[in-house]
Image (tube, rainbow, N blue to C red):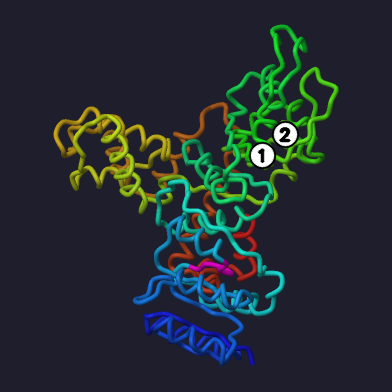
Amino acid sequence: MKKIFVVDDDKSIRWVLEKALTKNNYKVFVYDDPKAMILDIENFKPDVIISDIRMPGMSGIDMLEKIKREYPKIPIIIMTAFSDLETTVSSLKKGAYDYITKPFDINETVKLVEKASNNLRQAYSQDKIKYTKDVSKIIGMSESMQVIYKSIGKIAKTDVGVLILGKTGTGKELIAKAIHDNSDRKDNPFIAINTGAIPTELLESELFGHEKGSFTGAYSQRIGRFEQSTDGTLFLDEIGDMPMEVQTRLLRVLQEGEFFRVGGSKPIKVKTRVITATHKDLKMLVAKDLFREDLLHRINAIKIILPSLKDRRSDILDLTNHFINIYSEEYKTPQKNLTDDVKKIFLKYDWPGNIRELQNICKYLTIMSSGSEVTLEDLPKELLNEVDELENIKSWEDILELWILKNYNNKSINISKDIDIAYEKILIKSSLKLSNGNKTEAAKILGWGRNTISNKIKNN
């Protein structure tokens, strides 16, 4: 019988996990103190350890470090109600098998324990894991951001290609930088380039460089971004706007690890990690012959989908304080505090420009508002008007109509497909909240089968 150690100072958590795991034929040992648990490892040799991260006496991270030094093959699953990027990445880089946040789906947790106990060789390496505190500053404790932190922690240890999807202003470059900063490439260059902002005739030279005299105006040799970022990371933003002829050259580099400078005859070999991003639907562009399908498959090995700011409202005030602190210091102005009325406006507003719009508003308020308090009178009128318009909406049908009118015009086509996708995502998200994350219960709420909801979550 496989043995599981459960460590948590919360009695209810210990009870729930003990009952669920015992029911699934595990022998469960529970502890409220990590020090007592560590003393029992040698005697009982657990197959899996599940531990909270914040406990009196010894933290889950300290416990993780100690056990990994002495028993590197034991899978340790870290759980917590609190998660930020540094904590998540730290636990994963120090050897945690996985990271779950409370409240968790007990059925999914049991499956995770089973997977951990069955795949020790594949899941663990005895190589010493390096850790860096040089973590890009990403603000947010929302559930959706915790998922992203976990992804960064796992992806950073590899050289696999990553595609970051998200609307304009959601922080795609910041996520790419966080992956780089937590990888073995962190001491080498991170270079970001917006492929949609450079004219087609210059983009090839920008990426691959050119030889002297290769075209009019090429008065000297130029080293391109691929060469500059070799052994580091090249972030290609808005790849959906990349011209087809450049896509072809990019595909060759990704496949063969080499390219020719414009006008050159000598192949240049590089070991550059490429991370891409876009706000566009690349599958739709493939269908319209505007994006290469083979390139999409090449860059889409792992996908990170960033939420819009309105879908992570619990992070808005933390982000606001962060930006205001930065700009108060930069512009030498008094520290600003938002009144309760202003906070309510910020939480109600939909932030169509996402984090970038919030950042600009914070900069405006830091410079333009008088004194140390930001009041309603200090806010831009257009922001107040938008919130008033939202408050006058009577039903979800009104909200849908407003959303359609804001996002489409008389030249739009096939918008029902977009709306169907958004509608289905909202149904799934809402049912999971109503069921406290239990997929079986969420499926019942929707009137779907469990396989249906699981497949739809996977595809979305």
**Secondary structure beneath disc 2?**
loop
**Image quadrant containing the C terminus:** bottom right
Q: Nearer the viewer, residue 379 or 15?
A: 15
The answer to whether residue 226 is visible is: yes
* Residue at x 70% of width, y 12% of height: 220
How much space separates mark 1 and mark 2, taking CA atoms?
Answer: 7 Å
**364 displayed left or right of 207:** left
Name which residue lies at 44% across and 44% down.
Answer: 400
Q: Within the magenta stretch, is there residue 36?
A: no
The residue sitting at the top extreme is: 216
Whether residues under marks 1 and 2 lie with C-beta atoms below 8 angstroms apart, the answer is: yes
The circle on residue 7 is none
Judging from the image, what secondary structure is the residue with disc 1 in? helix
Q: Does 96 lie within the magenta span?
A: yes
- Which of disc 2 and disc 1 is earlier in sequence? 1
Q: Residue at x 72, y 16 (%)?
A: 221
The percent coordinates of residue 58 (x first, y second) are 39, 75
Horizontal and vertical percent position of residue 123: 67, 69
- Can the viewer see residue 108? no
Q: Is residue 399 above or below residue 86?
A: above
Q: Which residue is mark 2?
A: 291
Among the 4 quarters of the image, the one containing residue 77: bottom right
* First to last magenta residue range: 95-100
Sort mark 1 into few (<14), some (14-19) or many (20+) by Cα contacts within 10 Å: some
Between 357 and 396, the one lying in front of the other is 357
User: In this view of the protein, which residue sits in the foreground, 60 or 115?
Assistant: 60
Instruction: Check disc 1 and report the residue beneath it.
Output: 282
Residue 279 higher or lower than 58, as above or below: above
Dot 2 alpha-carbon crowd within 10 angstroms: few under 14, some 14 to 19, many 20 or more: many
All told, the count of numbered labels is 2
Q: Quadrant of the N terminus?
A: bottom right
Above or below for 148 versus 71 = above
